[in-house]
Image (spheres, rainbow, N blue to C red):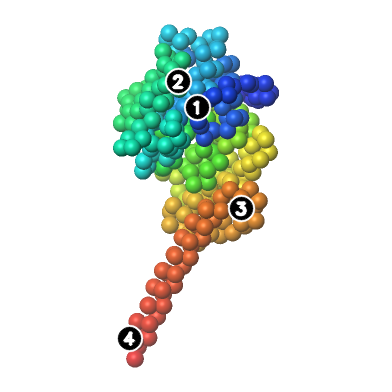
Amino acid sequence: MSNLARLYPLLDDVQLPDDLPYTQCSTWELKFLYLLGRHHLTGQDRIVELGAGGGGSTYALALGLHESPVFDEKTGRLHAYDFFRVGKGTFASEKFFTSGKAPEGGNSFLEEFKGRLEPFLPFLEIHAGDLWQTSDPDDRTPVEFLHIDIAKTARVFRCVSERFLTRLRPGSVVLHQDFAGPRLPWLHHSTGALLPYIELAGPPIRSTLAFEVVRPIPEHVLKAISEDSFSYDEKLRLISAVQERVDRDHTGGIPFRSVLELAKAYVAHYEGRHRQAWQLTKPLLDDEYLARTRADHFEQLRKAYEKDRAEKGGGALFTRLVRKVAGR
C-alpha cells in the first residue's frame, strides 16, 4: 500500500464544515485535501495550491494543516496562486463572489477569498495574478505538495512544469484536479512520462489523480514535459501507459480509460490531425458517461473534422477543375 493509499479508508469519516467556501471540487476531493493536511504533510518544504479559486479547496487543506500535530503554523506556509478575478482567460466563476455575481465595474474576488480564509491567514501566502508573473523562476525550494487546478491551457502548464514540477523530490505529492478533462491532454501524457518515477495513490478521487514521487525525476524528462517535445505518437503511447494503470475513479462513476481515449483525440485535434481525432472519437460516441458529460467535446471534434474535410475536398475539386481546363 502506498503512503497515500492509507488515507482512502478515512474518507467516509471526514466531517467538513457545512459553510465551506464555494468550490468546483467535489466533496470527496475536499475530504482528501483535508486528510493530506491533517495526516501527511509536514510543512518542511513548500505546500503549493495552483488554482485556489473561491477558496473551498484552500480551506479544506488549510483546516487539515491547522489540525495537524506536526505542521508548525509559525514556520510552515501554504502558498495559494490564482488570478482571483473573473474574465477572459481566467476560467473563474462569478460564483466565487460572495453575492454570486461580480460587482459593477469590478472583477476581483480577492477580498472575498481573504475573508473566507481569515482563520488561516497567518500561515497563508497569497499570490494574485498571472502565474508567469507571480511565480519565481529562480525559486528552487523543494515542493512537498502541489495541487494543480490551474493548467487549463498549454501555456499555463508550461509554467507549472518549468517552475514547480522541477522542484519535486522523492516524497513530494501531486494532485491533478482536472484529470477527468479530455481537453487537457498535457496532464495525461506528462503523467505517462512520469510513471517510472511516481507511485499512484490509488484510483482517482473523482476527477483528481494523486501520486507521490518515489524516485528522482531525470532532468531530461522534466525538460521534455515543459517543452512539450514529445511527438504525436509518443503522446498517444504515454497516455496508453496511463490507461493501463488507471481505470475508474474510487466511486466507480468516472471511466478514466474512456476519458483518456478522448484525450488522445484532443492530442490529434490540437495538432491539426482532425481526421485522426474523429477516428479516435467515433468509438466513444456510445460511451454512456462521455455521451452524458462530454457531448460538447464530441460536437467540437466533429465540426473540426467536417470543416477540415470540406476544405480539403474543396481544394481537391478546385485542383481537378484547373487541370481539366488546362488540358483543353
Q: For this view, does 172 lie left or right of residue 160?
A: right
Residue 19 in view of the camera: yes
Of 95 and 83, nearer the camera is 95
Report helix, strand or loop for mark 1.
loop
Report helix, strand or loop for mark 2.
loop
Where residue 73 appears, as percent x and y from the top left, is 46, 10
Question: What residue did someone put label 3 on?
Answer: 291
Q: Which amino acid does the dot numbered 3 rest on? A: Ala
Q: Tell which circle, 4 or 2, labels the residue nearer the N-terminal end.
A: 2
Q: Tell which circle, 4 or 1, labels the residue nearer the N-terminal end.
A: 1
Question: What residue did someone put label 2 on?
Answer: 117
Which numbered marker is on residue 326?
A: 4
> How far is mark 4 from mark 1, CA to CA?
70 Å
Of 155 and 167, nearer the camera is 155
Q: Check the image and report above or below for 126 versus 95.
A: above
Q: Tell which circle, 1 or 2, labels the residue nearer the N-terminal end.
A: 1
Which numbered marker is on residue 54?
A: none
Query: Local crowd at mark 4 within 10 Å, few (<14), some, or many (≥20)?
Result: few
Residue 219 in view of the camera: no
> How far is mark 3 from mark 1, CA to CA?
31 Å
Quadrant placement of the N terminus: top right
Q: Nearer the viewer, mark 4 or mark 1?
A: 1
The residue located at (34%, 91%) in the rendering is 328
Q: Check the image and report above or below for 73 versus 203.
A: above
> How far is mark 2 from mark 3, CA to CA?
38 Å
**Marks 1,2: beta carbons within 8 A:** yes
Query: Local crowd at mark 1 within 10 Å, few (<14), some, or many (≥20)?
Result: many
The residue located at (51%, 32%) in the rendering is 23
Q: Quadrant of residue 130?
A: top left
Question: What residue did someone put label 1 on?
Answer: 21
Where residue 135 appears, as percent x and y from the top left, is 34, 27
> How far is mark 1 from mark 2, CA to CA?
9 Å
